[in-house]
């Protein structure tokens, strides 16, 4: 991912998920690079196969909706975005995708989990978490901020003898709808 905070790409309006008939976000709204188009599905299939799981139509549908959403989605938002599986299938498929390292579950401020594709499938990014409505948006930080974070990781490694292989950074506050 590239560029600075002011270059954050527009992401889906959280209210839009409940408007209109089952609207699937379009590719042009996607903040992610074309990873999913290139070989994302093959990667996902390989990951599932490692634990003897199949890349079923339902799991593929979840991966596609998550790839197109451009932000982490809660289960009702997944359904509003076009996931037409029973609630229990959605839970089961998400659990399997999570186990296989395809999907990451995010805790939010409202006790409702959000789901996104694993970062190695979509690109490194960070989150804005609304402490009022629980919505999570993706943001890309500038290269300068990323290198400052990398330096902090290095310092922690030497100071605390902790071997970090990733970092997470999120801003908590009020989204534009709740402010
Ligand atoms: Zn909010
Ligand atoms: Zn970062």
Image (tube, helix red, strand yellow):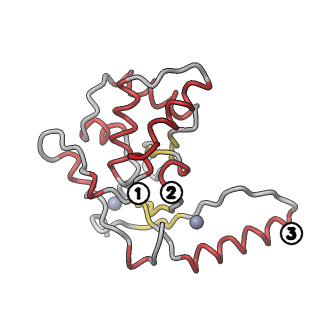
Which badge, 3 or 1, is on the more N-terminal residue? Answer: 1
C-alpha span from label 3 to label 1: 34 Å
Residue 138: image quadrant is bottom left
User: First in sequence: mark 1 or mark 2?
Assistant: 1
- Which residue bears the numbered disc 3? 159
Dot in front, 3 or 2 = 2
Q: Quickly name the residue at label 2.
A: 123
Q: Nearer the viewer, residue 65 or 87?
A: 65
Contact? badges 3 and 1 (CB < 8 Å) = no
SS class, disc 3: helix
Please tell me the numbered disc located at residue 32.
1
Q: Is 115 rendered above or below residue 93?
A: below
Residue that lies at the very extreme toward the front in this rendered image: 38
Question: Which residue shows up at 42% across the image and 49% down it?
Answer: 110
Q: Position of residue 127 (x, y in %)?
A: 47, 61
Mark 3 and mark 2 lie on one chain; the one further toward the N terminus is 2
Give percent across and percent down for residue 162. 82, 58
Residues at badges 1 and 2 in contact (C-beta under 8 Å)?
yes
Q: Is residue 79 left or right of residue 112?
A: left
Question: SS at mark 2?
Answer: loop
């Amino acid at each position: 991912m590239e560029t600075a905070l002011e270059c954050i790409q527009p992401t889906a309006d959280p209210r839009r998920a409940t408007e209109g008939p089952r609207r699937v976000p379009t590719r042009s709204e996607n903040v992610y690079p074309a990873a999913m188009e290139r070989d994302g599905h093959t990667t996902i299939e390989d990951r599932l196969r490692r634990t003897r799981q199949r890349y079923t139509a339902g799991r593929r549908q979840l991966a596609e909706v998550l790839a197109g959403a451009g932000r982490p989605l809660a289960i009702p938002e997944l359904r509003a975005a076009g996931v037409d599986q029973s609630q229990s299938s959605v839970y089961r498929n998400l659990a399997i995708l999570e186990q296989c390292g395809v999907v990451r579950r995010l805790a939010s401020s409202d006790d409702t989990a959000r789901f996104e594709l694993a970062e190695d499938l979509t690109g490194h990014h960070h989150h804005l978490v609304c402490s009022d409505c629980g919505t999570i948006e993706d943001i890309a930080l500038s290269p300068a901020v990323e290198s400052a974070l990398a330096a902090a990781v290095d310092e922690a490694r030497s100071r605390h003898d902790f071997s970090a292989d990733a970092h997470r950074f999120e801003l908590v506050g009020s989204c534009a709808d709740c402010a």
